[in-house]
Image (spheres, helix red, strand yellow):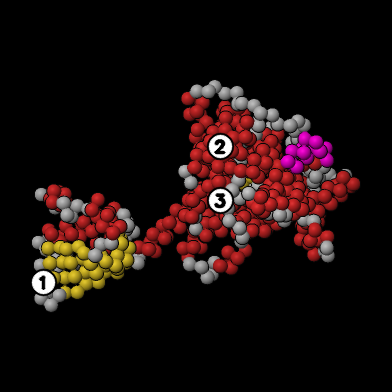
Amino acid sequence: MFEMIRRHWLSNIRGDVLAGTVVALALIPEAIAFSIIAGVDPKIGLYASFSMAVVIAFAGGRPGMISAATGATALLMVTLVRDHGLQYLLAATLLTGVIQILFGYLKLGALMRFVSRSVVTGFVNALAILIFMAQLPELTNVTWHVYAMTAAGLGIIYLFPYLPVIGKTLPSPLVCIVVLTAVYMITGMDIRSVGDMGELPDSLPIFLWPDVPLNLETLWIILPYSLGIAVVGLLESMMTATIVDELTDTPSDKNRECKGQGLANIVTGALGGMAGCAMIGQSVINVKSGGRGRLSTLVAGVFLLILVVFLGDWVSQIPMAALVAVMIMVSIGTFSWQSIRDLRRHPLSTNVVMLATVVTVVATHNLAIGVLVGVLLASLFFANKVGQILYIGSRMDESGRTREYEVVGQVFFASSTRFTNSFDFKEAVERVTIDLSRAHLWDITGVEALDNVVVKYRREGTEVEVIGLNRASATLVDRFAVHDKPDAVEKLMGH
């Protein structure tokens, strides 16, 4: 117990505190922006980011990962807020948490093993593009001062680490924000700041039960939204956990993460916040700033609340150009540049899956749809490839009256047609033996293909014997095959 606490909370105190500070500063404009997308007051997103981060620091399955209000979930709330109001959004947030906890106990986090590497790469690249595109409004129709400040911020971020001693001590994104804020306050230049994005809250959140009728009508209103938010939130959280796993070379508990996200959303809804999930951009900032443990996530949430409630006058002075520079750094660091070089040497199917995921996510701005498209394409390509691994050879015995077929490979829906077409039903033989000792029947379609072969031979008056079935294939055949059931065969043969 103590060893786990030491490893997750006390092994990297300085790095976690500094990284959490950077993340808290970067969370503010995003939380406000996502609140505006959802159509609610900025404090709803800020309270959500505080509570999500604090709860997930204790309950999550991935140390060092940041959860807060996100754009992916905010997009799903727009219609609910417009048609029914804030109170129904808070109720939907509570139900989202319950659904996610249920998913955790059903161990749906294990489904991540079905997401191929090419889908993850496409997801990451698409997210990097979306993060960069989200900064463009801050860089269009602005004065040269904004470009100068952004360029200076990028220079600090990438060059500061090369300074001796101090460059390795302080995270460069934090230095960028502090320096550019000081320049902005001293010069008084006319550029956008955090304070221009919306009013910051001036009080701590309090527990409130949503003011909605507790009946089935309310449930049917919020259930579709809660289910969608729960699925999208968990999908982004699981993908984020996978990426942070790779960045830190440490494992995570996906099912615990599902439960943790659910608990965080329940607390968030009770505190007057909108539903959220893990954030890849902020998690990457945390890791690249030196955050590794749960302490960094806790500091991010607590410091965020302190900043907006007690230090709002100072926070409002942070120039957006500084945060734009930080997010551009995140997009550059998130994008898998190796994937571009790999396009020439990877198989076409892998490239198609990766690019389809990128294009779908960028076109729809919906990470879940992009991942779904990628997973479906990857599954189709895999099924087609495995379906090609099928060889059927045959030989005639010495008497010239028995043909022996040997099947090698996988028989399932993608290879069933090829399996059936490999037999010569018009050959004048008395007996056919089908040896399946080196084959495997995977599904009902494969069993039906075997039925069709046997029945067609029997129609021609040929005796058929099936041998060599392994235990799993034999179980399927016993349950679903009809070639050894006289009544069913009669129906198939049209009598």
In front of the other: 362 or 458: 458
Segment colored magenta? 302-314
Disc 3: which residue? 253
Residue 49 x/y as whole percent: 67, 40
Does residue 368 appear to the left or right of 319 in the view shown?
left
User: Quick one: which residue is furthest to the bottom in this view?
Assistant: 398
**Which SS class for mark 3?**
loop
For the point 15% across and 75% down, which residue is it? 397
Q: Which is nearer the N-term, disc 1 or disc 2?
A: 2
In front of the other: 286 or 437: 437
Q: Which is nearer the N-term, disc 1 or disc 3?
A: 3
Q: Amino acid type of disc 3?
A: Asp
In three-dimensional space, the C-alpha distance between marks 3 and 2, rounded to whole angstroms, equals 18 Å
Residue 71 x/y as whole percent: 62, 43
**Which SS class for mark 2?**
helix
In three-dimensional space, the C-alpha distance between marks 1 and 3, rounded to whole angstroms, equals 61 Å
Q: From where the camera sits, is residue 305 visible?
A: yes
Does residue 211 appear to the left or right of 10 in the view shown?
left
User: Quick one: which residue is furthest to the right in this view?
Assistant: 186
Q: Residues within 10 Å of mark 2 (few under 14, many from 20)?
A: many
**Residue 401 has which mark?**
1
Q: Residues within 10 Å of mark 3 (few under 14, many from 20)?
A: some
For the point 62% across and 34% down, which residue is it? 267
For the point 19% across and 74% down, which residue is it? 395
Q: Amino acid type of disc 2?
A: Gly
Q: Amino acid type of disc 1?
A: Arg
Give the main secondary structure of the magenta stretch: helix
Question: In the picture, residue 245 is in which quadrant?
Answer: bottom right
